[in-house]
Amino acid sequence: MDLMEKLAKERRLVNLEIQKTLIGKPDRIYSAARHLCLAGGKMVRPMLCMLSCEAVGGKREDGARTGAAIELMHTFTLIHDDIMDADDMRRGKPSVHKLYGVPTAILAGDLLFSKAFEICDPRAYRILARATSEICEGQELDVSFEKRTEVSEDEYMEMIRKKTGVLLEAATEAGAVVGGGKDEQVEALASFGLSIGLAFQIQDDILGVTADEEKLGKPVGSDIVRGKKNLIAINALASLKEKERKELLNLLSKKGNTDAEISRAIELFHDSGSIDYCKKKAREYIKTSDSSLQEIKDSTARKELRLIADYVVKRDL
Amino acid sequence: MDLMEKLAKERRLVNLEIQKTLIGKPDRIYSAARHLCLAGGKMVRPMLCMLSCEAVGGKREDGARTGAAIELMHTFTLIHDDIMDADDMRRGKPSVHKLYGVPTAILAGDLLFSKAFEICDPRAYRILARATSEICEGQELDVSFEKRTEVSEDEYMEMIRKKTGVLLEAATEAGAVVGGGKDEQVEALASFGLSIGLAFQIQDDILGVTADEEKLGKPVGSDIVRGKKNLIAINALASLKEKERKELLNLLSKKGNTDAEISRAIELFHDSGSIDYCKKKAREYIKTSDSSLQEIKDSTARKELRLIADYVVKRDL
């Protein structure tokens, strides 16, 4: 049975919490806020929160509300990111600003943000607040990298730690806190969340150039068009010979690449061995996450957390 | 001695909290976040929070951090509002999106939002979260009113309750909670804050057409240009004779009014008695706020809260 089916009950529970939370007036802002939340997200973060809650001795249901809060927070960042990146598609559907206009999309994001704090467990609100500050810092870094020709792997890793890692870390940490975990359990699960967060982002970058467009829900190679310095691009620029390096740099700095140009950039990624390099990196982080998990007593929840970690690098969307 | 001088020490304290909070990397997002926070805001909300804290028996300094949180929250809403309204000036300076571009301005707002939750007192975070949800609803209402020809006074009052009232209510409520106030004290101070919040917004609308442009820090009559249905416009449309009513409606629905058209609209506001009507309304809310304050034991803090209430309708900027 696949992971999503296995955790269908948990996802339903979180969905219910979200639906309950996103009812209000005026209709327009609430329907904008619901649009992406209920567009079939994978709900990895809420599942991590619920399972971490149970892994330290709590009931998994007790992590559902805070898990829903983290999903709202995640969705809020996606809505605002799509405005900043002028991305018109998300999860195979028009993005919120495309459907409702920029003003309502900004507001819908803000509303999800405040609703997250309304529903999260009091013991977890500061974890969420700190994570969100770092997400903002990470997004600013990400945008600033687009304008630079050189970004180091360390700089990239720090950027994705903030942009993606900290929210998965917050999900496992908050879950463990809500479950009444001891300090060392909370710490171990936080580390677990952070490691799979890093793997998750690297896998996302890989899928951005290797996945099926329909499954991806947005155009393949959009990071190339935007000149994003993700780990694949950074590694390729560092390992290609001068002629190919210059060619790739040109493709990345050009806006509005043709399909042929996108294909050529992807070819260069493959030739340079960068996609394999990133796959290896992602697997390494999953290995690190496994060590963190070893510090938690074995249980069904721990096994399922392990499955989520595996899913992160094996998923194709 | 004027109120701002009298409470200079309190404002300094809040400023320090804000400065301490808004240090981080990358520089660009933090400098965008600091821009408006340190552009000489009146800090009415933090002062309300500190004085409410003392009025129920706490130390006013203990309300400074949560007061700073509320000021950050307020500033976040201004930055996002300016993007939505395409306002290029605020407090006599270029708005954040004008200086840093829309993406960084959205992020700077989001960062202020999360920082507010990082520094506010744990007992107050839910008060802030609820208020912010209502502010989003209020802003959506405000934007939607621009497209309608008719808005009732009740609809307008509900809009400004959400858009402006609830944050002043949150300031006094949170201050009272942090000061360890009893339920009835918290409630009385919350009502006090809400009433002066309503008066504050009505006074803002009045100043938007009567104030000196330099003091205002933005063009006089910008609400007219945008076709905002504020209380002055609503009352004028309800009381003018048919010919003048039509003339005003035309002026309000037209975008990009000339200076002569703005002057004519303001003349119609005066002729209809709407500006006097709004001044009376604002004073009534200040009177209501006074009744709420009577339920609190007399003290220096209560006297100063009274002074803030008076200031709200007497200020000229």
Image: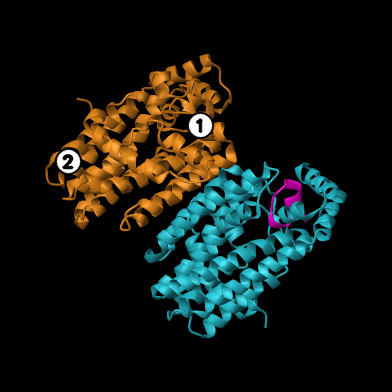
Chain colours: A cyan, B orange
The reply to whether residue A29 is in sight is no
Q: Is residue A225 magenta?
A: yes
The N terminus of chain A is located in which quarter? bottom right
Relative to B12, A317 lies left or right: right
In the image, taking residue B150 as reference, residue B67 lies left or right, namely left
Inspect the image, locate mark 1, and give the three-letter code of the amino acid beneath it: Ser
Name the residue beneath numbered marker 1.
Answer: B95
Residue beneath the point at 48% across and 22% down: B219
Q: Position of residue B249 (x, y in %)?
A: 52, 26
Q: Which quarter of the rendering shows the C terminus of chain A?
A: bottom right
Per the rendering, the mark at residue B302 is 2
Residue toward you, B187 or A201: A201
Q: Residue at x 44, y 75 (%)?
A: A185
**Chain letter belonging to callout 1:** B
Question: Does residue A165 sit above or below A304 in this rendering?
Answer: above
Mark 2 secondary-structure assignment: helix
Q: Nearer the viewer, residue A42 or B271?
A: A42
Q: Is residue B116 visible from the viewing direction of this image?
A: yes
Q: Residues within 10 Å of mark 2 (few under 14, many from 20)?
A: some
Residue farthest to the right, as pictured: A260
Query: If you read the primary sequence from the N terminus, does the residue marked by circle 1 or circle 2 appear first?
Result: 1
